[in-house]
Structures are given as C-alpha cells and as structure tokens.
Amino acid sequence: MSCERFREQIPECLAGRLDPAARERLVEHLESCAGCRTEVAELNAVWRAMENLKTKPEDAPDPAAKARFLAAIEGYKAGMGVSAEQQQTRRVLWFPRRPVWQAAMAAGLLLAGIFAGRYVAAPRQEAPELTQLRSQVESLRQLVALTMLQQQSPGARLRGVSYSEQMAEPDPQVEQALLYAVNHDTNVNVRLSAVDALQKFTGNPEVLRAMVDAIGVQDSPLVQVALVDLLVQVHARGAAPAMARLAQDARVDEAVRQRAAWAMGKLGGAQ
Amino acid sequence: MILDDEAIMTEVRAGDVGRLETLFDRHQPALVRYFVGLTGNRPLGEDLAQESFFRVLKYRHTYQPGANFRAWLYQIGRNVFADHIARRKTEVAMPEEVPEIRGNEMPPDREFQKKQEAVLLRRALAALPGDKREVLVLSRFLDMKYEEIAAVLKIEVGTVKVRVYRAMRELSDRFFALSGERAS
Ligand SMILES: [Zn+2]
C-alpha cells in the first residue's frame, strides 16, 4: 500500500474510527516511514486544535427559534403556512445588508460565545466504547508525541509537548523526552512548556530529583522559576534542602533565589 | 417510548406535523452548528437552520419512509445554503486579530496559546474551499461517520475519505503558514 493510501486513513485514525486491523497496518507503516510520521504529527496537532473550535452542543434549541417554528407548524395546521415563510425570508435578507459591522458583530458573538463559555455544557459521561477507542489509539499517540518532540522546528516540538499532555497514560519514554527537553532544548518556550507537561509525571520521585537537578543546569531564570513553582505546586517536600542551597547561591539570578527562598518556606524546609 | 427519527418523520409525512417539534428539539442545535461552521456567523447560522426546518415542514412528503432522517435533513440544509450563496455572495466572517506573544520574556500561558491557536485555525478554516470546509464540519464538528457523510453529500464513502484527508492536509498547511512557526 502506498504512503498516500496510508495517509488517507489518518483522519479516521485520529477520530478513533479506523478498524483495529487497518490501524495496526498504519502503525506498522509509521514505524518505518518518517514522512508519514510527520504527516500524522501535523494532522494530529490540527485535529486536536479543532476541538477548541467546536461550539459545544446546546441541549435545546434557542427558545425564540423554537417559538417561530412552532408558530409555523400552527400556521400549517391552520392552512396559512405561506406567511411564516415570508416572515422567514425577510429575516434572512435583512442580515447581510450592513456587511461590515454585521460581520464584525457576528465574529464577536461567535468568539464571545466560545470563550465566555456561553455554550459550555456540563461534562458528559463518555460511552464505554469511546473510552476503549481512546486506549487503542494511545500507543499511537505516544509514538506521535515522541516523534514531535524530536522535530527540527521549535513550533513542532512545542506541539509535541502540548500533545504529550493529552495522553491519558504517562509513558516513560515521553517522560524522558520531556526531561531531555527541559534540560537541552534550545528554545525557552519549549523548555517552559515541557516543565508544564512534566506535572503529570511528578508522582515519580525520579522525576522530582531530575527537576531539582535541572534547576542547577538551566541558563534561563524563567525556566528555573517554573521548575521551582512546579515543585511547590506538587508539595515536593524532599526538594526543600535544594531550595535552601539555591536561595544561598550567589551565582544564581536574584529573582530565582528569592523564589527559592519562598519555596523553602512553602515546603517547610526552613529550620 | 422513545420513537426514532425515522418513525417520527414517517408520521409527519402522513400529516401529523405537530410531531416535528420533537425532531426540531433533537436536531436544530447541531444544524445551527453546521451552518455556523460553514459561515462563521452565528445569527446567519440560526436563520439558515430555521429555513431548513421550514423546508422540512413544506417538503415533508418528499421524505422516503425509512430513509436516514439526519442525512435527509442535512441534504435539505445543503440546498438552503446553496440558495443562500446564490442569493448573495457571503464572505465567511473573518475572526479578530491574533494576539501576539511578546518575545521570549513572557511565559506562554496555556489558555492564551489555545486562544491564539483557535483564532488562527478559524481563519485557516474560513480560507478553505467550501467543499473541504463542509466535510470537516460534518466529520469533525458533528462527528458524522463517513457513511452518513456519503449519504448527505450523495457521494461514495471512498470519496469522503479522500476528501476529508485532503481537507485536513490543506487546513494544516494553511494553519501552520498562518502561525508561521511563531514559537521559533
Ligand atoms: Zn509512508
């Protein structure tokens, strides 16, 4: 099967709709084809981002719209459906008459609706089969996250980091890749995002130790502060002595030392 | 007892138009999302959904008993949209300006990034050709299966698959071009 045929299956795979046999063949192909891996990584990033564009399904129609429709039904029952249609036509034509501000208003409404949470529905229970599908694509996600973390462009690596955060199961390889990114990525934004993403792994004491070590080798005060903050956030009491040393270290940026002193207080390390 | 859409529509077709209320309740919100996805414009989307349900009422006798109701409804919706386009060349509303990340000094806030990403993506979507935008709205926003999309568009399932892929490919190209690898 050609790369093109495999690539055509990617959206179905991302939607969790590809049947298991086809998915296995796709994953097998991805293991040996860097081009298609990149394709998966890119399409996946966009597929995920589209989630934020979804206007959340409303439970019920807008009452005004429903009232108009019920009136039309009544009109039909009474044998005067025509007037309802005329009324409708007038509304549709009215709308685009002032295109500039109407469009601006519409865009504003749309965005306000999405961002102000007007359409945020209560979290709904996932159907069991959906949960199952999700776990089936999980291994593919890990593969994708790893692939993205190894990309040339910082943008792709950033997407890899944020993608890794969406994985339900923390994966050791991804954990290592994130730690590596914190310590060695040339881009500060990628390092900061990797610190955020590490939050899921802080149950592992090894990761906490690695984070403390990472503070010492960081050249960016921003990343150092982010690491300190995360340690405080997860109540890493074991990190208190390291914070004490950091607060005293004259080679460390002043802001970082102050943050470390604050962290020491929070972690109960000031004896 | 909860009747399925097809059973209800069959009753509507037979003259019990009052039963349309149930179908309106079940499908109007998603139909609005379909039109908002196509036009980027909520009031317009609501108007077009309204028009679609008026046509369901008016053309109820053209429903083939037993046929997938949702597919039939969206076929009507597509006609409404086509008529709207013919009446007036509407532009897809352009989303507002993209917020910029100011240098490396400001730690990228996750919510901020998501918002910025959503704006760019909405623009990229608005720039897609209509047929590509449509399959993405149906598959990604309304979670329709390829079989159902094929029924709505009256094309082969294999064609849907290729079209969704090409639409994703173009959307992704446009999206990354717009974002210009901002993080670098
Ligand atoms: Zn390939």
Image (cartoon, coloured by chain):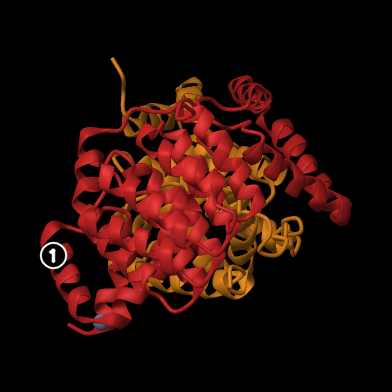
Chain colours: A red, B orange
- Up the image or down, A110 lies above or below A80; here it is below
Find residue A219 and report its horizontal and vertical position in percent: 54, 65
- Is residue B57 something that shows in the picture? no
Total numbered badges shown on the rendered structure: 1
Tell me if B64 is positioned left or right of A219 in this view: left
Q: Relative to A119, is A221 above or below?
A: below
Residue B17, horizontal then vertical, whole percent: 49, 25
User: Which residue is tagged 1?
Assistant: A24
Which of B19/B28 is in front? Answer: B28
In the image, what residue occupies the spot 85% across and 55% down?
A99
Percent of width and height locating residue A174:
29, 58
Question: Badge 1: how crowded within 10 Å, few (<14), some, or many (20+)?
Answer: few
Chain ID, mark 1: A
**Residue in the picture at 33% in, 48% down:** A209
Local secondary structure at mark 1: helix
> For the point 28% across and 81% down, which residue is it?
A34
Q: Residue at x 48, y 63 (%)?
A: A158
Name the quadrant of the C terminus of chain B. Answer: bottom right
- The x, y position of residue A236, in whole percent, is 38, 35
The extreme bottom residue here reads A2
Q: Label 1 is placed on what type of residue?
A: Glu
Near-viewer residue (A6 or B156): A6
Front-lying residue, A58 or A16? A16
**What is the quadrant of residue B86 in the picture?**
bottom right
In this rendering, is residue B142 above or below B28?
A: below
Quadrant containing the N terminus of chain B is: top left
- Dividing the image into four equal quarters, which quarter contains ligand 1? bottom left
